[in-house]
């Protein structure tokens, strides 16, 4: 007679739910209750899980497994204190129960006490018959501690036990990437593929590592093997397309991206990359159509809006470009690249106040490039806001005290503010730093070109 565990579990759940509806008290053994509780936890039904635990503890008050499930529910609800009381009591009764150590470690982890969690998990290893879960938990704790070497070692233990543990495989590659050890990752993945030659995930990851190392032929070979293992592997086609783009094989790249559209629902990434390829090939209308499909498919992909903006900037259709840049900024207000395009377009449209606000955002995001301070000051000059221009340039001077451009601009602003003493100070500093840029100063401030005071302050060669 064949015993179907799923049917047994389903029958227990139906029996339990029937009991809840009728208020009739039925008996379940402890194992049945464990299955019922696990079912409700797995399906995100904590209230039913709590009801099952409450009834289970009345019928089996000494069941360790049910008490452990109760503590797990309490932790999920954030009731750490009560969960700890249960675990401390169980720890005194069952010092050799690995689950108690695991749950206590889980609580410590939630408190960010990761070193203490590691120590408990190490103790649990000595008690575990199947240590895979514990090695995985240890790996995660080491990741929290930024100890990527030990994390890699723990996840490797998981793969030693179960070579198809792909979650651990991904985590190992993540550790190599974080350590920027792409050569190590290549060696590891090749060794892994010696044991599991038909693992498309490993071939895919190996191809990405070769791409990082700019070993493009090897990358393409790895992605080909991933596709041989799984002809429906969309990620491998996308990565192949990206490599072909780098090699300038744009038509072949497009073919790979097009293949992904037939394998599953179209992705915005595929539309975007196809658009970039067609734009490079001079197929502008097709590129524009694909960029529009990109944002239609995923309106929250800022790169799609940026591509549309760039397209119209190249066409000098700045109003349209500005519209798309605003869409991109609604998605990501901290993207400095978008803000730089935003100020450029606003300057082209002579919207200097908007450009000034854009420069303010760029600086507030931590971008202190020399050209940002200079261009912002020039915009403020055009707005006639000389005081704010001075304030901006003085901020820039803190980062670039010897920059001739900043000193020339400061000199001009002070002259416009009728503060000749300060103007002369910065003008002389600028001239000493770079006399050749004096003519740029005169171009920026043409009204000062005939100033007798300025001419007398500079060497004779500049008086004419």
Image (tube, rainbow, N blue to C red):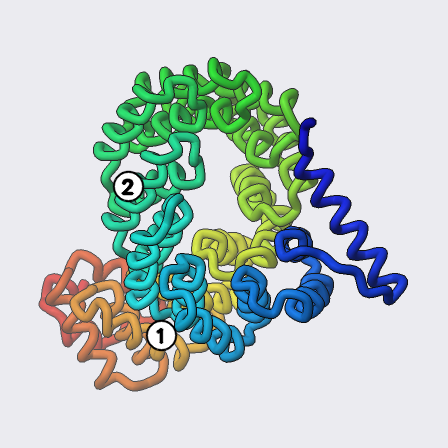
Label 2 and label 1: CA atoms lie apart by 43 Å
Relative to 267, residue 50 above or below: below
Count of numbered labels shown in the rendering: 2
Closer to the camera in the image, 231 or 305: 231
Give the SS element for disc 1.
helix
Residue at image location 56% in from the left, 57% down from the top: 329
Q: Name the residue under label 2.
A: 176
Closer to the camera in the image, 108 or 16: 16
Residue at image location 44% in from the left, 57% down from the top: 336
Q: Name the residue under label 1.
A: 392
- Give the class, few, some or many, for how many residues have Cα within 10 Å of label 2's Cα (few <14, many ≥20): many
Give x and y (percent) for residue 36: 68, 54
> Can you see residue 443?
no
Residue at image location 53% in from the left, 23% down from the top: 233
Which part of the image, by quadrant, shows the N terminus?
Answer: top right
Relative placement, left or right, of 175 versus 459 is: right
Q: Quadrant of residue 210?
A: top left
Give x and y (percent) for residue 365: 41, 65
Pointer 2 and pointer 1: residues touching (CB < 8 Å)? no
**Which label is found at residue 295?**
none
- Give the class, few, some or many, for how many residues have Cα within 10 Å of label 1's Cα (few <14, many ≥20): some
Relative placement, left or right, of 11 versus 252 is: right
Relative placement, left or right, of 459 versus 271 is: left
Give x and y (percent) for residue 127: 34, 53
């Amino acid at each position: 007679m064949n015993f179907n565990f799923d049917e047994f579990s389903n029958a227990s759940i139906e029996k339990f739910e029937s009991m809840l509806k009728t208020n009739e008290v039925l008996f379940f053994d402890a194992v049945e209750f464990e299955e019922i509780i696990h079912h409700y936890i797995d399906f995100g039904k904590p209230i039913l899980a709590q009801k099952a635990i409450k009834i289970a503890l009345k019928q089996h008050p000494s069941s360790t497994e049910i008490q452990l499930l109760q503590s797990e529910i309490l932790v999920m609800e954030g009731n750490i204190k009560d969960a700890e009381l249960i675990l401390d009591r169980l720890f005194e009764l069952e010092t050799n129960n690995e689950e108690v150590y695991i749950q206590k470690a889980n609580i410590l982890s939630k408190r960010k006490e990761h070193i203490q969690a590691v120590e408990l998990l190490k103790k649990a290893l000595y008690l575990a018959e199947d240590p895979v879960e514990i090695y995985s938990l240890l790996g995660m704790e080491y990741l929290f501690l930024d100890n990527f070497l030990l994390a890699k070692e723990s996840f490797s233990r998981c793969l030693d036990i179960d070579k198809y543990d792909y979650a651990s495989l991904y985590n190992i590659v993540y550790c190599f990437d974080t350590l920027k050890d792409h050569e190590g990752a290549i060696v590891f993945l090749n060794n892994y593929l010696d044991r599991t030659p038909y693992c498309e995930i490993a071939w895919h990851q190996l191809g990405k590592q070769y791409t990082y190392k700019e070993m493009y032929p090897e990358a393409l070979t790895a992605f080909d093997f991933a596709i041989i293992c799984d002809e429906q592997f969309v990620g491998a086609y996308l990565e192949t397309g990206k490599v072909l783009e780098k090699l300038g094989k744009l038509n072949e790249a497009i073919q790979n991206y097009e293949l992904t559209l037939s394998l599953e629902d179209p992705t915005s990434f595929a539309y975007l990359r196809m658009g970039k390829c067609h734009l490079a090939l001079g197929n502008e209308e097709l590129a524009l159509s694909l960029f529009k499909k990109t944002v239609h498919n995923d309106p929250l992909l800022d790169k799609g809006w940026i591509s549309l903006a760039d397209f119209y900037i190249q066409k000098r259709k700045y109003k349209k470009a500005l519209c798309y840049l605003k869409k991109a900024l609604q998605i990501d207000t901290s993207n400095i690249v978008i803000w730089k395009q935003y100020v450029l377009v606003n300057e082209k449209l002579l919207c200097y106040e908007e450009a000034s606000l854009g420069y303010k955002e760029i600086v507030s995001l931590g971008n202190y490039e020399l050209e940002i301070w200079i261009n912002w000051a020039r915009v403020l000059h055009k707005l006639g806001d000389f005081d704010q221009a001075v304030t901006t340039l003085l901020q820039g001077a803190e980062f670039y005290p010897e920059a001739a451009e900043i000193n020339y601009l400061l000199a001009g602003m002070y002259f416009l503010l009728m503060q000749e003493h300060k103007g002369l100070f910065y003008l002389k500093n600028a001239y000493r730093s770079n006399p050749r840029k004096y003519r740029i100063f005169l171009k920026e401030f043409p009204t000062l070109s005939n100033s007798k005071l300025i001419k007398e302050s500079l060497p004779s060669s500049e008086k004419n």
